[in-house]
Amino acid sequence: MSSLFSRLESLLFVASKPLSTKEIARSLSVSIQEVDDVVSRLQVKFSHEDSGLHIVMNGSEVQMQTNPANAQDVERFVKYEISGELTKAQLESLTIIAYRGPITRPELEQIRGVNCAVILRTLQMRDLVIEENDEYGVQRFRISLAALAHLGVHTPEELPEYAEIHTHQHIDQALQQDDI
């Protein structure tokens, strides 16, 4: 198994929001003190002038962010990403979310077979999907009203062949694999 340093670095890289040290500890099955120690080491590795990434702490929350000195370059790139055409992977993910949403990230990844963190972040930045927590605090994604309006419908149920695709047997089977 990878070292805790490597595991925590990967977790911060794919997280689209700040994570509490408590939820990191729970996720990695380690103590909060171990998380704090590794976060300090990650800050030494990343949080300096020549690094494109910084580890930021605010109270007990931790997040990997871009170096503030690179803000103009990042902003220009993000602006291009938001205004450009959707990639095939983004369109696939948006379609799954439209027809199966609200859907969790692990469910989306199970259907697509790949990590979707960056795709979800891009779709959110483009106001095509919305992230919300259900009554149990589980993070789910659904198509946005703006995306529905762009498609000329008011609800996902108005999408072509919605009823058939929403409950499609092959998608249900994909979701049942690995007991998601």
Image: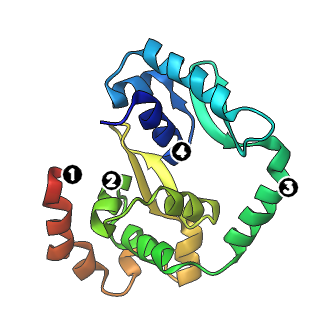
Q: Residue at x 68, y 69 (%)?
A: 82
What is the crowding at mark 1: few (fewer than 14 residues within 10 Å), some, or many (at least 20)? few
Q: Earlier in the sequence, mark 2 or mark 4?
A: 4
Residue 106 circle label:
2
**Could you tell whether 60 is left or right of 48 in the image?**
left
Give the CA separation, mark 3 to mark 4: 21 Å
Mark 2 and mark 1 lie on one chain; the one further toward the N terminus is 2
Q: Can the viewer see residue 155?
A: no
Locate residue 157, reporting x and y percent. 36, 75
- Please tell me whether residue 174 is drawn above or below residue 4 in the rendered image: below
- Numbered disc 3: secondary structure: helix
Residue drawn at x 61%, y 39% is 64
Q: Which residue is mark 4?
A: 13
Which element type, helix, strand or loop, lies under badge 2?
helix
Q: Residues within 10 Å of mark 3 (few under 14, many from 20)?
A: few
Q: Nearer the viewer, mark 2 or mark 4?
A: 4
Tag nearer the camera, 1 or 4: 4
Amino acid type at circle 4 is: Phe
Residue type beneath disc 2: Pro
Q: CA distance from mark 2 to mark 3?
A: 33 Å
Q: Quadrant of residue 102?
A: bottom left
Label 2, label 4: how far apart the Cα atoms are = 16 Å
3 or 4: tag closer to the N-terminus: 4
**How far apart are labels 1 and 3 at the CA level?**
40 Å
Residue under pointer 1: 180
Circles 1, 4 touching at the beta carbon (< 8 Å): no
Q: Amino acid at mark 3?
A: Gln
Residue 73, compared with residue 32, is above or below; it is below
Circle 3 sits on which residue? 72
Give left or right: position of 22 versus 36.
left
Q: Position of residue 146 (x, y in %)?
A: 59, 70
Provide the secondary structure element on which disc 1 rests: loop
